[in-house]
Image (cartoon, rainbow, N blue to C red):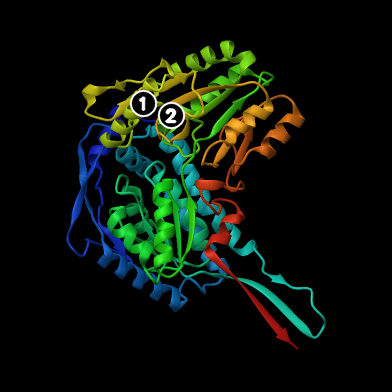
Amino acid sequence: MSHMSRAEWETRANALDIEGRAFIDGRYVPARSGATFDCISPIDGRLLGAVASCDGADADLAVASARSAFDSGVWSRLAPAKRKAVMLRFADLLEAHSEELALLETLDMGKPISDALAVDLPGSIDSIRWCGEAIDKIYDEVAATAPDQLGLVTREPVGVVAVIVPWNFPLMMASWKLGPALATGNSVILKPSERSPLTAVRIAQLALEAGLPAGVLNVLPGYGGTVGKALALHRDVDTLAFTGSTQVAKQLLVYAGESNMKRVWLEAGGKSPNIVFADAPDLQVAAEAAAAAIAFNQGEVCTAGSRLLVQASIKARFVPMVVEALKAWKPGHPLDPETNVGALVDSRHLEGVLQRIQGGQEEGARLLLGGRVALEESGGSYVEPTLFDNVSNGMKIAREEIFGPVLSVIEFDDAEEAVRIANDTPYGLAAAVWTADLSRAHNVARALRAGSVWVNLYDGGDMMAPFGGYKQSGNGRDKSLHAFDKYTEIKATWIQL
């Protein structure tokens, strides 16, 4: 919880000097074309500033700068202990500026300031620091060979990495990719979402101050269809790492195939099942977790527990508990430290969420809570956390990712049916199981086609837990040492002695 009042945060917000230019080759520059776009706050619709709208010309400059830095060896061949020291200084600078960065995050995409401070910033700092710490603790391999041969298995940085991140956790999603990409010696071009570019632009300067050489981290704000597409098609980008929608993820695979077959790593959408069995250790805890799993960050979470699967024998008792728990999540002004539900990212997204809610009612689901616009007088984009009962898994609200605080309750009879419903989705990002039965917990967790399974909690794991999806939720993993696989090539060197 923030130690400042809403008034103090607003004073600080008004005093902020917002940088909106691109960062190429170690300095802030306008887009080559001079184009900008308006950065609007979803809190109240006010203009935060003009941000550089980069395109192919800027992508060419940034890629050339990144390639030149990579080839020079100034970072890619720096001694691991020295790279580590820079990464740790970078993490320290993020920490020193955490209130400013949290404020930018909140103004830009509408999340509550207390979440930005308690979740986004620590998560971002932890990623950079953890990956920095790992640099000099990862060993290459020596193969088991005959005495007259030496077989080396080494990891080398892949080269120039383009990173395209979403607007829901702008800094944290960037850090999950910057950590391993920089730690392994690559040069990076970061393309933040046009809906939330401010923290990405700001941290470029902090990285430079930490000692990251010019050209090793470039930041290109702009639209997906211009600069994002240019990076995805660029023949001198070796690897593309993306978090965002499944629709865009598929298009990026096409661009890679049309260009240089660059490695593409994707973390895409989800429609995660949260499965509550009758023997859950504590139904009250499960109900509160179910509410948090859909309302936290306004439901704008790729792992949001948007499908609540409830065993038939407890449904009449359990659903009212979830309704009560969800009532505690109320939209409020994001700069008020007491607020736990902020604004949706923009008015267009709000419109889309409201259409899905309308569609759920038309499909025959029963609206038990919410479903309406909130705080309309603010000029911002707010919606009440919403709960639908009597949802069948074939309904659109159970199949399509809404990316808002909209929960669908689906009934099941036994473990077999729960697993069938849970897996009946194009996605496979996350899932949760609530049961006191050890064997059932293991068996169901094993049967779920998802990259993360949480038992008797929702959204567990830290930097040591790999994060990513099955099926159309993507490929590859963020976090943990497994993330390093995305940003390195493995070389076999065989020597006859």
Quickly name the residue at label 2: 397
Nearer-the-camera pick, 276 or 160: 276
- The residues bearing labels 1 and 2 have C-alpha atoms spaced at a distance of 8 Å
Q: Residues within 10 Å of mark 2 (few under 14, many from 20)?
A: many
- Horizontal relation, residue 466 to residue 406: left or right: right
Q: Residue furthest right?
A: 147
Q: Quadrant of residue 433?
A: top right
Quadrant position of residue 436: top right
Q: Secondary structure at mark 1?
A: helix
Q: Earlier in the sequence, mark 1 or mark 2?
A: 1
Q: Identify which residue, 160 or 215, lies in the foreground.
A: 160
What's the amino acid at mark 2? Answer: Ile
Q: Residue at 39% of width from left, 66% of height from top? A: 258
Secondary-structure class at tag 2 = helix
Any mark on residue 359, and which? 1
Q: Are marks 1 and 2 in contact (CB under 8 Å)?
A: yes
In this rendered view, identify the residue nearer to me: 297 or 442.
442
Q: In x, y percent, where is residue 284?
A: 59, 17
